[in-house]
Image: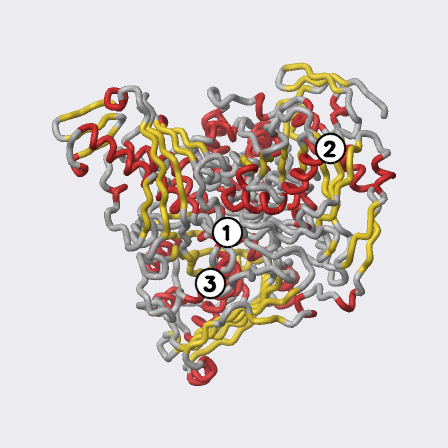
């Protein structure tokens, strides 16, 4: 079995990876790092539960191998806030009941966190009126940009509310 | 322990006479901070030392026998520990409430995707690789001898049909009548957390972390499968990543992990893949429903027929109870309600959110819309005219029933105009626009339950039950019930759930969890109040509990002073007594929706949707409304996108993943508008509460079907209403 040493920065801490190269970033986080906040909902990039932020951008960690992330800075849900010190998005999710079973929630929050930055950077979406210029995050824009994160409990209306409120508070 | 049997409506309505004032309030969930920070620990996530990893192997034939495995080849792979195909393992999921092991003969294959073995290795990738490499030798049953599709099997009556009067004659005599056949395709729960278990064996007791809904039954199902006494089994499910019926009964991964842990003498974790969840857990049966509705000249029902064909594996007792709400929702003296069950070799059919009403109401409410068009009246008015005085068959009274109020409230919020229902009248650019409505109804269930409440010497309280919180809000509402009854700030009440070491309840299923276990919590608190009355030496009706103080007459004492260092611990044992069958008790509601149908592609977008619901007392307005909007979104999926596709040759699921089985995503769901109608139902539970977890789906898809007809003039009677079913019939632009 080929062994490959890699060094990843996760939530500010350094983690060494030298395991089975078939290990997904998701399994590395959950099994080897004990960071089980990142969830496995399909393992095929279809549900978004495993969303983490890599160098500022959201990815499905199940579709990425741990060996691919030498030197990368990774933020997981554990790096955004703690139960006693919630991030603004986390607090808004609680306030608006933007979750039920809670299983997709870390992915939703990591996704929303990075999505707000994408919008600030002017990235257009499928529902944007034009491809250039400033992005105004309407309810529809948020819904479209969050459609990679399935919530089977279907807290979607409340997820949009939580993100809207966080965005408005940050402006 | 205090036992109380509910033999008559509980008109004491205690929760409206307590002082704390927290019941029903939209408080945040106590489990919220753990969930939003990733600290809530789900079944597969427990850090168990020396834990081996197991991966299930599923059958790739539809019927036959496993003759053997070529184990040597995979046992030689790195890290592989064992290949297990054991007579204790289960071939099917247990049905909800089964309380005993399901079919166990894993080598006797009855459907494509049946679990047949478990491969155990040191790591997940090693086990996965070996499971994929394992060669299986089969004896394959001749396809001609195997019914795989519903139309290949003769459907037999399931239970006695309801036959009253003469429906054939009434249909002939009716001033207005419709005789329609609707079909729905198979569906799945698709909870976000895949089925997962970690089993540990200490030589005497089997302890498992598992993702389950109803531990009180699950412990007996697992014990039976393993041939152990239930006392030697402990199940823990503190957080469950959604269930929606799929985790009512134990599934194959729990028993496989348990057998492996016993055999190998070390902990074993088994997590299903998403594909395996589709292939071997539970499906909702497809249905074919004939609806015969006939009225007099004024639109009053005289004939009501609802006959359905559903399917399941040979030997399964469950048949999708399609006609459940049809028994009590609308009038009509001449009735025929029947379920016919076809025995076919596809994965086990079982309960998916709102079994029965989810598909039955969807079709009934679409047929009611067609009837309203035939009569020529507002579909809201048709429903109002057909709310029966008494149960149409059993001749018993209804308990509290808010159907008419919900229809009025939702119509008002939505801005409904039912005066002109001509279809295909409104177009905005490329889109046809239409509106539609439906009633909601779901039968109320209540079950025996126990809960332990401890008022601690420091003036805080702990509630404990084996009840689960699958996202429904159990932690939240039980905390509020105890806080209200004991006069405590909810912050001072800790709720502990999901452990069979705690007193048993019915679990989460059939929308009965909150009302049943909540009634046990209330009962335990009543006994604690009696103990406080004894200590204070006053009359029970003089006692006021608020903010951690007990007041009786002119005496006022803080709990620590009153308790003098000793906890008061009580178990409430709530029993469904003679109340059962005295009343027709159900939750009701109404849906109104506006859709846009693309004139060129046939794509349907739900633009807005309003729901009003009567659920008895809402124990927490926020979590109750979340249940409602979740159900409404399920209605969108049922109406437009969700369908299991089976290969007709061998019954394998062609779309066993979330890329091809389309559950609604964020952009598919508009900003849903849900509202609760104030209600107390003394016949429903001592809390005056009914259930809310399933009502929001029951009829929602019908409203969308009706709106599509109104938008386009096209009536599609086969759910889901995908673009291919619309496009050829759309009106010219």
Nearest to N terminus: mark 3 or mark 1: 3
**Count of labels in the image:** 3
Q: Are marks 2 and 3 on the same chain?
A: yes
> Pointer 1 indicates a residue of which chain?
B
Indicate which disc residue B674 carries.
Answer: none
Residue picked out by circle 1:
B607
> Pointer 2 indicates a residue of which chain?
B
- From the viewer's perspective, is B386 left or right of B632? left
Image coordinates of residue B206 in percent, x first then y, are 60, 35
Residue B515 in sight:
yes
Spatial CA span between label 3 and label 1: 30 Å
Q: Nearer the viewer, residue B348 or A154?
A: B348
Image quadrant holding the N terminus of chain B, namely: top left
> Pointer 3 indicates a residue of which chain?
B
Spatial CA span between label 2 and label 3: 44 Å
Colouring = secondary structure
Residue picked out by circle 3:
B324
Nearest to N terminus: mark 2 or mark 3: 2
Other residues around mark 2 within 10 Å, as few (<14) / some (14–19) / many (≥20):
many
Q: Mark 2 and mark 3 in contact? Answer it, CB < 8 Å.
A: no
Residue B721 in sight:
no
- From the viewer's perspective, is A93 left or right of B679? right
Q: Residue at x 62, y 19 (%)?
A: A11
Asked if residue B578 is positioned above or below residue B657 in the image, the reply reads: below
Q: Residue at x 70, y 33 (%)?
A: A62
Q: Please state which of the two labelled residues, at mark 2 or mark 1, is closer to the viewer.
A: 2
- What secondary structure is found at the residue carrying circle 1? strand
Q: Nearer the viewer, residue B255 or A28?
A: B255
Residue picked out by circle 2:
B124
């Amino acid at each position: 079995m080929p062994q490959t040493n890699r060094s990843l920065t996760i939530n500010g801490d350094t983690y060494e990876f030298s395991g089975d190269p078939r290990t997904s970033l998701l399994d590395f986080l959950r099994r080897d790092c004990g960071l089980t906040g990142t969830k496995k909902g399909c393992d095929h990039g279809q549900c978004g539960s495993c969303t983490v932020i890599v160098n500022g951008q959201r990815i499905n960690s199940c579709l990425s191998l741990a060996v691919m992330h030498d030197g990368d800075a990774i933020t997981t849900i554990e790096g955004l806030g703690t139960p006693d010190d919630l991030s603004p998005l986390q607090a808004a999710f609680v306030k608006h009941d933007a979750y039920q079973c809670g299983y997709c929630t870390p992915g939703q929050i990591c996704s929303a966190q990075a999505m707000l930055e994408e919008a600030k950077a002017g990235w257009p979406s499928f529902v944007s009126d034009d491809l250039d210029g400033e992005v105004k995050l309407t309810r529809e824009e948020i819904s479209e940009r969050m459609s990679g994160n399935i919530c089977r409990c279907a807290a979607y209306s409340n997820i949009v509310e939580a993100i809207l409120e966080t965005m408005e508070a940050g402006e | 322990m205090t036992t109380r049997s509910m033999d008559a409506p509980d008109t004491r309505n205690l929760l409206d006479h307590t002082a704390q004032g927290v019941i029903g309030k939209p408080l945040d969930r106590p489990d919220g901070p753990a969930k939003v920070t990733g600290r809530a620990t789900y079944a597969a996530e427990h850090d168990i030392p020396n834990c081996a990893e197991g991966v299930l192997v599923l059958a790739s034939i539809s019927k036959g026998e496993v003759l053997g495995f070529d184990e040597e080849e995979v046992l030689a792979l790195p890290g592989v520990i064992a290949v297990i195909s054991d007579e204790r393992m289960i071939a099917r999921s247990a049905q909800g409430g089964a309380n005993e092991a399901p079919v166990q003969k894993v080598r006797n294959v009855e459907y494509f995707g049946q679990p047949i073995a478990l491969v155990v290795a040191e790591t997940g990738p090693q086990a996965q690789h070996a499971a994929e490499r394992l060669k299986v030798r089969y004896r394959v049953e001749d396809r001609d001898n195997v019914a795989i599709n519903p139309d290949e099997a003769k459907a037999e009556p399931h239970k006695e049909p309801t036959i009253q009067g003469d429906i054939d004659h009434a249909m002939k005599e009716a001033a207005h009548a419709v005789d329609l056949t609707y079909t729905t395709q198979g569906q799945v729960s698709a909870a976000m957390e895949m089925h997962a278990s970690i089993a540990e064996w200490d030589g005497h007791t089997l302890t498992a972390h598992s993702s389950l809904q109803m531990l009180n039954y699950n412990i007996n199902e697992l014990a039976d499968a393993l041939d152990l006494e239930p006392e030697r089994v402990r199940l823990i499910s503190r957080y469950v990543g959604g269930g929606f019926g799929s985790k009512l009964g134990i599934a194959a991964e729990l028993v496989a992990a348990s057998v492996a842990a016993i055999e190998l003498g070390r902990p074993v974790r088994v997590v299903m893949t998403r594909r395996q969840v589709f292939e071997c857990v539970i499906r909702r049966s497809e249905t074919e429903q004939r609806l015969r509705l006939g009225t007099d000249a004024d639109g009053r029902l005289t004939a009501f027929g609802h006959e359905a064909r559903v399917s399941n594996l040979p030997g399964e007792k469950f048949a999708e109870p399609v006609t459940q709400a049809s028994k009590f929702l609308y009038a009509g003296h001449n009735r025929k309600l029947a379920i016919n069950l076809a025995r076919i070799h596809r994965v086990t059919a079982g309960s998916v959110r709102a079994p029965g009403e989810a598909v039955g109401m969807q079709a009934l409410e679409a047929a009611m819309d067609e009837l309203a068009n035939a009569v020529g009246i507002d579909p809201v008015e048709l429903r109002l005219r057909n709310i029966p005085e008494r149960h149409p068959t059993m001749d018993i009274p209804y308990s509290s029933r808010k159907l008419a109020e919900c229809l009025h409230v939702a119509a008002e919020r939505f801005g409904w105009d039912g005066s002109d229902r001509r279809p295909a009248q409104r177009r905005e650019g490329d889109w046809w626009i239409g509106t539609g409505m439906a009633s909601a109804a779901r039968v109320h269930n209540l079950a025996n339950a126990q809960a332990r409440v401890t008022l601690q010497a420091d003036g805080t309280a702990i509630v404990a039950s084996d009840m689960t919180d699958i996202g429904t809000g159990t932690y939240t509402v039980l905390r509020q019930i105890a806080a209200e009854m004991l006069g405590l700030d909810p912050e001072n009440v800790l709720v502990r759930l999901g452990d069979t070491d705690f007193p048993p309840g019915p679990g989460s299923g059939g929308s009965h969890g909150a009302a049943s276990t909540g009634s046990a919590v209330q009962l335990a608190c009543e006994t604690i109040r009696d103990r406080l009355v004894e200590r204070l030496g006053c009359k029970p009706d003089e006692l006021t509990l608020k903010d951690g103080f007990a007041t009786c007459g002119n005496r006022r004492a803080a709990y620590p002073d009153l308790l003098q260092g000793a906890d008061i611990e009580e178990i409430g044992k709530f029993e469904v007594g003679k109340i059962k069958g005295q009343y027709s008790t159900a939750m009701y509601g109404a849906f109104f929706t506006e859709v846009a149908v693309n004139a060129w592609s046939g794509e349907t977008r739900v633009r807005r949707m309003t729901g009003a619901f009567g659920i008895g007392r809402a124990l927490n307005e926020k979590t109750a409304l979340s249940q409602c909007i979740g159900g409404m979104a399920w209605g969108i999926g049922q109406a437009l996108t969700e369908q299991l596709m089976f290969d007709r040759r061998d019954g394998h699921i062609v779309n066993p993943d979330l890329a091809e089985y389309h559950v609604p995503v964020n952009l598919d769901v508009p900003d849903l508008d849900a509202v609760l109608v104030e209600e107390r139902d003394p016949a429903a539970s001592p809390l005056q509460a009914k259930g809310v977890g399933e009502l929001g789906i029951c009829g929602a898809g019908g409203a969308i079907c009706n709106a599509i007809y109104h938008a386009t003039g096209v009536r599609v009677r086969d759910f889901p209403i995908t673009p291919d079913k619309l496009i050829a019939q759309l009106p010219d632009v």
